[in-house]
Image (spheres, rainbow, N blue to C red):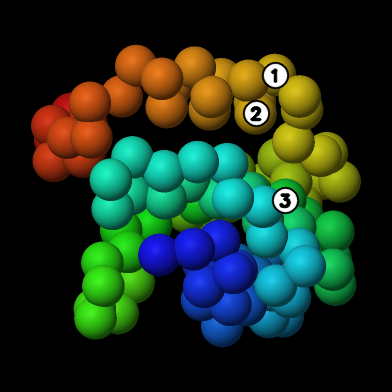
Amino acid sequence: MDERFIRRMMSTMKCTVCGERYESGNVNVLGHREDVWFLSVFCPSCHSQGLVAAVIKDGKAPQIVTDLMQGEKAKFGAGNRVEADDILDMHAFLKGFDGDFSKLFAR
Ligand SMILES: [Zn+2]
């Protein structure tokens, strides 16, 4: 699994705000924990930005676990960009995260 594949996979996804497709150049791989990849995406069309977690396994269609843009649509729709703090939070989260999404989302 390499970042190029992830970017290509993400370029088939559509922006949840405006419906345009992402371009592979607008996808940043933040890191991964085993099969769970964390990505930041930037829509070239409406300039919204978001964080995505996806489970990507060899030979399987990727499964988007969470798309933070959905919940923060209003925030991004208002023209705010992802703050540096948000990215730092994500990195802190990645460091401490044990990879157990079922536990994480059971809350
Ligand atoms: Zn968009």
Type of amino acid at the residue the image marks with label 3: Gln
- Of the 4 image quadrants, the one containing the N terminus is bottom left
Cβ of mark 2 under 8 A from ligand 1: no
In terms of depth relative to the viewer, which is nearer, 91 or 44? 91
Residue 64, horizontal then vertical, whole percent? 37, 62
Q: Which label belongs to residue 87? A: 2
Q: Are marks 1 and 2 in contact (CB under 8 Å)?
A: yes
Q: Residue at x 83, y 39 (%)?
A: 80
Q: Which label belongs to residue 49? A: 3
Earlier-in-chain disc, 3 versus 1: 3
- Of the 4 image quadrants, the one containing the C terminus is top left
> What residue is pinned by disc 1?
85
Q: Marks 3/1: CA distance?
A: 14 Å
Residue 102, horizontal then vertical, whole percent? 13, 41
Residue 21, horizontal then vertical, whole percent? 68, 80
Type of amino acid at the residue the image marks with label 1: Asp
Q: Residue at x 67, y 52 (%)?
A: 28
Q: Residue at x 82, y 45 (%)?
A: 78
Earlier-in-chain disc, 3 versus 2: 3
**53, above or below 93, in the image:** below
Asked whether the viewer can see residue 14, the reply is no
Say which element carries label 1. helix
**10, above or below 26, in the image:** below
Type of amino acid at the residue the image marks with label 2: Ile
Mark 3 vs mark 2, foreground winner is: 2
Asked whether the viewer can see residue 23, the reply is yes
Q: Quadrant of residue 22?
A: bottom right
Q: Marks 3/2: CA distance?
A: 11 Å
Q: Marks 1/2: CA distance?
A: 5 Å
